[in-house]
Amino acid sequence: MLSLRREGKTLPCDRLLAPKTIAADFPGFEMAEGVPDQFWSTGINLLSETEFVALAEEFIKWCQSLQEMKIYIVSHECFNPVKNVSK
């Protein structure tokens, strides 16, 4: 979900998890590097299209830098990308 209204609201069911919680609950997952701290508390749902595109391009570059055949991205309408590193 990408809101095109800066004053828009997210759904009540949207709940962001702290990186420490995700790491503790999913130790086999690798968190995306370079995610600005603000997104762990505010999410990405209210970004402008320009801001979203810039963030998405950074994320795609990070994914490419992993040089993996497959990457599984786990998310729920917010920027919580992880890579499963369990073999």
Image: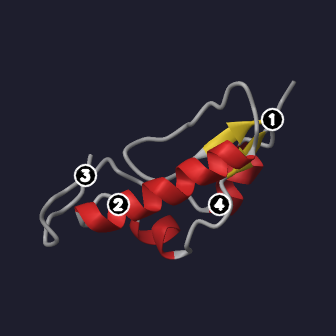
Q: CA distance from mark 3 to mark 4?
A: 22 Å
Of the numbered discs 3 and 4, the one sitting upstream in the chain is: 3
Give x and y (percent) for residue 81: 57, 47
Residue at x 58%, y 66% (from the top left corner): 35
Mark whose residue sits in front, 3 or 4: 3
Residue at x 64%, y 67% (from the top left corner): 34
In contact (CB < 8 Å): disc 2 and disc 3: yes
Q: Amino acid at mark 1?
A: Val
- Would you call the spot at circle 2 few (<14 residues within 10 Å), some (14-19), or many (20 or more)? some
* Residue situated in front as seen by the camera: 48 or 22: 48
Asked if residue 16 shows in the view, the reply is no
Give x and y (percent) for residue 66: 75, 43
Q: Which residue is mark 2?
A: 52
Q: Amino acid at mark 2?
A: Phe
Q: CA distance from mark 1 to mark 2?
A: 26 Å
Of the numbered discs 1 and 2, the one sitting upstream in the chain is: 2
* Image: 67 above or below 46: above
Instruction: Please state if 31 lies on the left or on the right of 85 as rendered.
Output: left
* Image: 6 above or below 53: below
Instruction: Please state if 47 lies on the left or on the right of 20 as rendered.
Output: left
* Residue situated in front as seen by the camera: 51 or 36: 51
Q: Which residue is mark 1?
A: 85
Of the numbered discs 2 and 3, the one sitting upstream in the chain is: 3
Q: Residue furthest right?
A: 87
Mark whose residue sits in front, 1 or 2: 2
Q: Amino acid at mark 4?
A: Pro
Q: Which residue is mark 4?
A: 19
Q: CA distance from mark 4 to mark 2?
A: 20 Å
Q: CA distance from mark 1 to mark 3?
A: 28 Å
Q: Which mark is residue 2?
A: 3
In contact (CB < 8 Å): disc 1 and disc 2: no
